[in-house]
Image (cartoon, coloured by chain):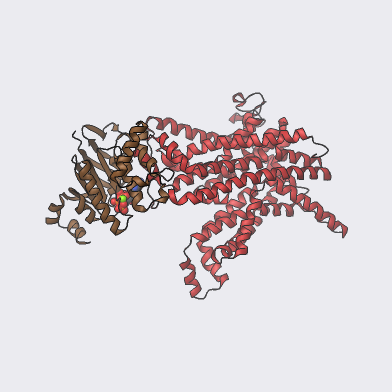
């Protein structure tokens, strides 16, 4: 039914694997996110304030960079700590669960942290005063009141994993374990119209699944909003922190170690591998910059750097500028059309990148055919990539800015209107300075993922269309581990720097963007 | 049973900001003590130290012959057996009135029959029997407040801690509740520690008033003593505002 080169059994297998992978990641990240959110908001864990920000960082790290790092660590032949893995090393289902959970953790964590922060802490304190111990308080009060954001966070984790391409491509494809996104990619790579056609049909399956989960998530968000009033603190009261007592030191140590293993260890692994002369020889005395030099001197690297910089800067600027005006029209001028456009932006945002790319490829083929009839040719992968990025990320800027416009008191604007300012002057002299921090944050939150984008780029790329993501993917496919690690190290450092810079943003703002 | 609540040199700082200077307070068994002071003076903090929701920076807290907080001792709030009513009521929205009031008994493992009896008795005391099956969103502010009071009283605690319980009610209801709380205190014979910034509440209900300003005790005494001889300076100034 699906196409020539593909059996129904293969499709069903990929479908089942996609679903079980997403479910496993949702459950693991949900449990971990819940535990850490409780610890940093409600207990006296050591360094809670710092942890609270640090744990929101993984969301900004492209998962495939962590995948690359875990290949360095768990490659069955030369992995630095391959002993802790089964025979196949980090490759296979367990490896995908591990790496995807690290990043997907951020969704339930941020959702629940925001839930705890918004909830009136007296509700829980009243239970303690009634004689309930902390665990009982969680079971009887916190959980019944906060399950919607918790399950919603798990839905987002599920959706994220279902749509992800990089990690299944790096850790699943080498051992012929396909999920929907990688199956679509491999079909497409077969080439020709039949490849595109079966890719399209598979995309439809993926899209339907994603929309089902999204509907559940939206229902949960509305449920929580309706209940909101009953559990929100009327005035900000600070929660009394639950004393962990004798468990404080071990719990604190464990949580910090887990953070280090999730974020710091991969960075170190990439660094070591980038500096090692050959994969497997990690002794500092042999360190060399050869790999880094080699990568930087690759012709594809400079092409990719220019492309990725140009694309992320121009598209992020365009998207944020559009969001700035649209959100103004929607929030401050009550424009129905603008509100409708912002609403519609949510659709591509939640659509798996693979699906967007396949659709654009289909459209571009059609456009090329049509133009060919007039003797024209139009064949620039960069344009289609830019379009794909804009579609995927336009919701981020518009939503963040809409939230920011809503928070400003109308009187500020009215006083300017009274003094005779036109809309344009108003936007430039009042709103832009007022919202400059949000504008900047929105810009970073769109530019960063675009700079390292892989899922859509890898499908849309072509001659002259190399990006950071596609170059890394190629090096990794050629099994050139030291070079791939060197490039991944550069990208991960940039992503971590960006994430660290953004970690102070309130959890809610980040959620709004996601 | 003698269960005086005694604070000896209890102090609290958040970071290097001292919110409460070392202070001694006694809530004698069966008395009604009101902590009175302007907003931000540290009343809630003091109450939370007693409840065990915050940890003092110094001092001792003793109930009867049990040390609740002291050198090497820090009993967690769930084992201190106080009843507490929060300013925001903190009535659980996912439980009925009955469920809310029943909870402290359930946590302590009391049997169902005895529980039901005790809950209905306490609700009767608050004139709330008819509302037992309702959820909080079906209640008025005053009724939510009564639910919170019933929940705090149901396990017959030695001391009931109240944090500005009337500040969210309208003036008429406040007057009514002042009377009711005073009657409750007389009927049940428990100790009450009542935090407020409203002198009317303090003078109308309390047997002893402790006036606090900027984390220090300015004056303490019976309502009559304070009315007759307010300490010069802050207390005189504070009492002159209505
Ligand atoms: N967890 C905390 N961390 C830092 N400062 C705090 C904390 N809790 C309270 N404070 C500070 O301690 C001081 C006293 O606060 P508290 O809530 O006890 O005042 P209050 O007398 O109850 O005031 P109100 O009548 O407004 O409720 C305030 O200045 C407050 O900002
Ligand atoms: Mg207070």
Tell me which residue sits at (40%, 30%) in the image.
A247
Using residue A214 as the reference point, say whether residue B185 is left or right of it: left
The residue lying at 21 percent from left, 39 percent from top is: B6
Q: Is residue A87 left or right of residue B174?
A: right
Using the image as rendered, state which of residue A439 and residue B97 is in the foreground: B97
Tell me the quarter of the picture where residue A171 sits: top right
Does residue A367 sit above or below A68 in this rendering?
below
Horizontal and vertical percent position of residue B161: 28, 44
**Is residue A388 in view from this perspective?**
yes
Residue B79 vs residue A223, the one in the foreground: A223
- Seen at 55% across and 73% down, the residue is A422
Give the farthest residue toward the bottom. A420
Q: Nearer the viewer, residue B113 or B196?
A: B113
Q: Colour of chain B?
A: brown
Q: Position of residue B102 (x, y in %)?
A: 36, 38
Image coordinates of residue A416 in percent, x first then y, are 49, 71
Is any part of residue A110 visible from this angle? Answer: no
Question: In which quadrant of the rendered image does the N terminus of chain B lie?
Answer: top left
The x and y percentages for residue A298 are 72, 43
Q: State left or right for residue A96 relative to residue A111.
A: right
Chain drawn in red: A
The answer to which of A493 and A339 lies nearer the viewer is A339
For the point 43% across and 30% down, the residue is: A250
Q: Quadrant of residue B28?
A: top left
- Quadrant that contains the C terminus of chain B: bottom left
Q: How many marks?
A: 0
């Amino acid at each position: 039914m699906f196409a020539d080169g593909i059996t129904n059994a293969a499709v069903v297998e990929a479908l089942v694997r996609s679903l079980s992978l997403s479910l496993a990641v949702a459950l693991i990240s949900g449990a971990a996110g819940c535990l850490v959110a409780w610890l940093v908001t409600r207990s006296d864990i050591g360094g809670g304030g710092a942890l609270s920000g640090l744990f929101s960082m993984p969301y900004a790290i492209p998962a495939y960079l962590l995948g690359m790092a875990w290949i360095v660590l768990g490659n069955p032949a030369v992995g630095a700590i391959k002993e802790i893995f089964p025979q196949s090393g980090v490759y296979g289902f367990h490896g995908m669960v591990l790496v995807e959970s690290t990043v997907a953790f951020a969704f339930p964590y941020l959702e629940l942290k925001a839930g705890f922060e918004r909830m009136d802490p007296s509700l829980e304190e009243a239970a303690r005063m009634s004689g309930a111990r902390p665990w009982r308080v969680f079971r009887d009060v916190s959980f019944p009141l906060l399950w919607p954001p918790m399950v919603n966070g798990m839905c987002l984790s599920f959706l994220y994993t279902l749509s992800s391409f990089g990690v299944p491509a790096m850790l699943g494809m080498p051992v012929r374990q396909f999920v929907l996104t990688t199956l679509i990619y491999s079909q497409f790579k077969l080439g020709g119209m039949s490849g595109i056609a079966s890719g399209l049909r598979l995309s439809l399956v993926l899209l339907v699944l994603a929309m089902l989960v999204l509907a559940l998530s939206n229902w949960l968000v509305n449920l929580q909003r309706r209940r909101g009033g009953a559990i929100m603190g009327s005035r900000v009261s600070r929660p009394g922190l639950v004393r962990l007592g004798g468990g404080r030191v071990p719990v604190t140590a464990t949580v910090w170690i887990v953070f280090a293993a999730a974020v710091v260890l991969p960075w170190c692994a990439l660094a070591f591998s980038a500096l090692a002369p050959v994969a497997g020889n990690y002794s500092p005395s042999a360190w060399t910059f050869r790999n880094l030099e080699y990568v930087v001197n690759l012709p594809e690297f400079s092409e990719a750097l220019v492309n990725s910089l140009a694309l992320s800067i121009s598209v992020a600027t365009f998207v944020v500028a559009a969001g700035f005006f649209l959100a103004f029209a929607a929030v401050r001028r009550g424009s129905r059309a603008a509100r409708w456009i912002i609403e519609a932006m949510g659709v591509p945002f939640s659509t798996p990148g693979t699906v967007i790319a396949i659709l654009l490829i289909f459209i571009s083929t059609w456009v090329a055919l049509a133009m060919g009839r007039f003797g024209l040719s139009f064949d620039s992968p960069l344009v289609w990539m830019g379009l794909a990025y804009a579609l995927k990320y336009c919701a981020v800027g518009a939503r963040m800015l809409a939230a920011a416009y809503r928070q400003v008191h109308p009187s500020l604007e009215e006083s300017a209107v009274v003094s005779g300012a036109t809309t344009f002057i108003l936007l430039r002299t009042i709103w832009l300075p007022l919202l400059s921090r949000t504008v900047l944050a929105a810009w970073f939150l769109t530019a960063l993922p675009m700079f390292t984008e892989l899922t859509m780029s890898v499908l849309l790329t072509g001659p002259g269309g190399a990006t950071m993501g596609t170059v890394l993917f190629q090096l990794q496919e050629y099994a050139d581990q030291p070079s791939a690690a060197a490039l991944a190290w550069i990208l991960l450092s940039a992503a971590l720097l960006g994430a660290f810079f953004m970690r102070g943003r309130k959890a809610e703002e980040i959620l709004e963007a996601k | 049973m003698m269960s005086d609540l005694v604070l000896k040199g209890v102090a609290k700082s958040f970071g290097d900001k001292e919110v409460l200077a070392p202070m001694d307070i006694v809530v004698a068994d069966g008395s009604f003590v009101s902590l009175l002071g302007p907003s931000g003076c540290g009343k809630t903090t003091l109450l939370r130290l007693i409840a065990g929701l915050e940890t003092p920076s110094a001092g001792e807290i003793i109930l009867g012959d049990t040390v609740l907080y002291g050198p090497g001792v820090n009993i967690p709030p769930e084992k201190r057996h106080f009843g507490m009513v929060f300013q925001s009521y903190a009535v659980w929205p996912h439980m009925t009135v009955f469920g809310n009031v029943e909870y402290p008994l359930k946590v302590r493992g009391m049997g169902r029959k005895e529980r039901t009896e005790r809950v209905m008795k306490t609700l009767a005391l608050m004139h709330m029997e008819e509302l037992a099956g309702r959820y909080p969103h079906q209640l008025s502010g005053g009724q939510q407040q009564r639910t919170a009071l019933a929940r705090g009283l149901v396990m017959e605690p030695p001391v009931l801690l109240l944090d500005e319980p009337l500040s969210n009610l309208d003036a008429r209801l406040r007057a009514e509740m002042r009377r009711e709380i005073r009657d409750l205190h007389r009927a049940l014979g428990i100790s009450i520690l009542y935090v407020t910034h409203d002198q009317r509440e303090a003078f109308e209900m309390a047997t002893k008033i402790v006036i606090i300003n900027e984390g220090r005790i300015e004056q303490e005494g019976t309502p009559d003593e304070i009315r007759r001889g307010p300490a010069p300076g802050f207390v005189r100034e504070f009492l002159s505002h209505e």
